[in-house]
Amino acid sequence: VTCMDAAIPMVITRAQDLGKTGYETKAELDADKHFLAKIETIRRIAGERMGLGDVTNRVIPKLSIIAPPRQGGTITSRYFVPDVCHTAHAVTGAICIGCCSLLKDSVADGIANSTNSGNEIVIVEHPSGQIQISLITSGNGSLMKVESAGIIRTVRLLFEGNVYVSNRRI
């Protein structure tokens, strides 16, 4: 488990360490009540150790299970809010996962496809696609510092048409 706070406090664990692939659908993860109870226990213990106190009735820290990427990204993540898997991925969670993927000796070390070049685009694969995070860092290992974090958004056409406005309204 890696506990970190980069945009949001998170508990990050390898999916395989919990008997999962990390590629399960939201429905598959939400249906596994034993698994959900296990990650809630981990989240509560980690929250205490992170200095957040009793997080039983709180939504922070968030929890994510990670796996190697399969669709050309940097890392795969399933993000929990807190007792169900998110349909996609929260932006703050993706920033934290992105930072974790660059950190030597984190749970992402060895499974994330990243270089920590100082100016990195991290692609987080999630149940409904992917989210791209831009990270500018300095230093390495435990001395790594995130200088800047952002999200790269793309848009698609949602509607095309004409609107007629009455002259009386203008």
Image: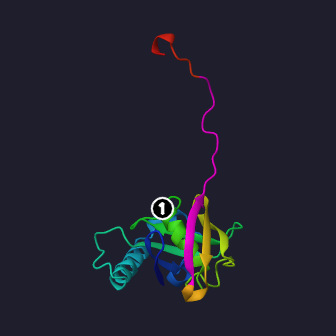
Pinpoint residue 119: horizontal percent, then vertical percent.
67, 71
Give the left or right position of residue 5, taking residue 153 as reference. left
Dot 1: element: loop
Q: Is residue 21 above or below residue 123?
A: below
User: In the current view of this chain or complex, which residue is farthest to the top?
Assistant: 168
Give the quadrant of residue 126: bottom right
Q: Residue furthest right?
A: 72
Q: Position of residue 50 (x, y in %)?
A: 37, 82
For residue 99, say whether it is visible: yes
In percent of the image, x 68 and y 70: which residue is there? 70
Who is closer to the viewer here, 101 or 56? 101
What residue is rendered at 51% in x and 66% in y? 28
Total labels: the figure holds 1
Q: Which residue is mark 1?
A: 86
- Magenta stretch contains residue 153: yes
Q: Is residue 107 left or right of residue 85?
A: right
- x and y percentages locating residue 1 in the rendered image: 48, 84
**Relative image position of residue 146 (x, y in whole percent):** 55, 75
Magenta-colored span? 144-162
* Residue 2 shown left or right of residue 150 in the figure: left
- Label 1 crowding class (10 Å Cα cut-off): few <14, some 14-19, many 20+? some
**Compared with residue 169, is residue 26 higher up or lower down, i.e. above or below?**
below
Is residue 21 in view? no
Q: What scheme was used to colour the molecule?
A: rainbow
Residue type indicated by callout 1:
His
Question: Would residue 35 be counted in the magenta stretch?
Answer: no
Q: Quadrant of residue 124?
A: bottom right
